């Protein structure tokens, strides 16, 4: 099973699972484009990749992106500073995770900064390796 999706959302100082994705591929119908949640159909190794771009406005702060599991714990996390002097950043990565059936994975965004808002775009994909 595999999926690929893109999203363009505005975020404010918050932690959130990115929702409202546009799917270009979802072979097992396991990715919910409305909620942004992938439900693992079979236990095994899964490769997830993402690319995210953000432009800040308002206050400076830290921008984080990562993958969260069913209990909202970050399994993989990257951070970048967004501010007046550096207001645009790109983050990308990939990770292989050993997952159990029915576990969920989502791509999340977290901003740390008073009155910070970002214009955001991302791609998110996953494929079962074994």
Image: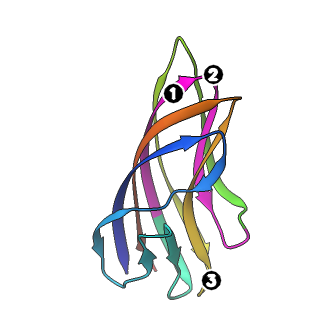
Q: Residue at x 50, y 74 (%)?
A: 38
55 falls in the magenta region: yes
Above or below, comparing residue 69 to residue 53 in the picture: below
Give x and y (percent) for residue 62. Answer: 65, 31
Other-residue count near label 2 (Cα within 10 Å), few / some / many at <14 / 14–19 / ≥20: many
Range shown magenta: 48-71
Q: Is residue 15 left or right of residue 94?
A: right
Nearest-to-viewer mark from 1 and 3? 1
Above or below, comparing residue 71 to residue 19 in the picture: below
125 falls in the magenta region: no
Give x and y (percent) for residue 6. Answer: 35, 56
Q: Do the CB atoms of the residues marked 1 and 2 lie less than 8 Å apart?
A: yes
Q: Secondary structure at mark 2?
A: loop
Other-residue count near label 3 (Cα within 10 Å), few / some / many at <14 / 14–19 / ≥20: some
Give x and y (percent) for residue 11. Answer: 54, 43
Q: Please give the label number shown on residue 56.
A: 1
Q: CA distance from mark 1 to mark 2?
A: 7 Å
- Identify residue for label 2: 60
Q: Do the CB atoms of the residues marked 3 and 2 lie less than 8 Å apart?
A: no
Q: Say whether disc 1 or disc 3 marks the residue closer to the N-terminus.
A: 1
Give x and y (percent) for residue 24. Answer: 26, 66
Report whether residue 129 is seen: no
Front-lying residue, 66 or 56:
56
Above or below, comparing residue 128 to residue 5 in the picture: below
- Identify residue for label 3: 100
């Amino acid at each position: 099973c595999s999926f690929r999706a893109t999203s363009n959302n505005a975020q404010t100082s918050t932690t959130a699972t990115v929702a409202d994705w546009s799917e270009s591929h979802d072979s097992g119908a396991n990715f919910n484009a409305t909620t942004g949640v992938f439900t693992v159909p079979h236990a095994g190794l899964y490769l997830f990749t993402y690319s995210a771009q953000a432009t800040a406005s308002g206050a400076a702060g830290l921008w984080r992106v990562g993958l969260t599991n069913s209990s909202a714990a970050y399994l993989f996390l990257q951070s970048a500073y967004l501010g007046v002097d550096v207001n645009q950043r790109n983050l990308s990565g990939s990770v292989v995770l050993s997952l159990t059936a029915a576990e969920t994975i989502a791509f999340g965004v977290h901003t740390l900064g008073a009155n910070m808002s970002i214009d955001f775009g991302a791609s998110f994909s996953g494929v079962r390796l074994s």
